[in-house]
């Protein structure tokens, strides 16, 4: 799982690909979901991935 998050944070994989890895599903399955289902899964994604991952880095300058 940490490798998956590293890949995502380094922009190696997309949100959908990360969610697919976390759910142990092919990304194509998530792509074919109806909008309501996909929206619900993205909400789960944001609940599973720690909030600091989405935080905008602060400029120290």
Image: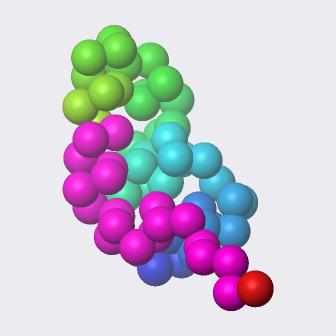
Q: Is residue 23 visible from the viewing direction of this image?
A: no
**Residue in the image at 24% along x and 56% along y:** 47
Quarter that holds the C terminus: bottom right
- Residue at 35% in and 15% down: 35
From the image, which quarter does the N terminus lie in? bottom left
User: What residue do we see at 44% from left, 18% from top?
Assistant: 32
Task: Please state which of residues 7 and 53 is positioned toward the viewer in this rendering.
Answer: 53
Residue 29, quarter of picture:
top left
Q: Position of residue 22 (x, y in %)?
A: 36, 58
Give the answer, above or below, for where 36 lies relative to 49.
above
Q: Tag count in the figure?
A: 0
As drawn, which residue projects farthest toward the bottom? 60
Is 4 located above or below residue 37 in the figure?
below
Using the image, determine if residue 6 lies above or below residue 25.
below
- Residue 31 inside the magenta-drawn segment: no
In this view, which residue lies farthest toward the top? 34
Q: Is residue 34 left or right of residue 57?
A: left
* Residue extent of the magenta highlight: 42-60
Q: Residue furthest front?
A: 61
Query: In this orientation, does residue 56 appear?
Result: yes
Residue 45 image point, x, y percent = 32, 50
Front residue of this view, candidates 8 and 54: 54
Q: Residue at the location (34% across, 39% down)?
A: 42
Front residue (pair 31, 44): 44
Q: Is residue 7 above or below residue 29?
A: below
Q: Is residue 59 magenta?
A: yes
């Amino acid at each position: 799982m940490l490798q998956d998050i590293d890949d995502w944070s380094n922009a190696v994989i997309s949100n959908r690909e990360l969610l697919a890895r976390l759910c142990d599903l092919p990304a194509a399955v998530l792509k074919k979901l109806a909008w309501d289902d996909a929206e619900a899964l993205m909400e789960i994604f944001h609940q599973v991935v720690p909030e600091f991952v989405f935080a905008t880095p602060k400029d120290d300058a």
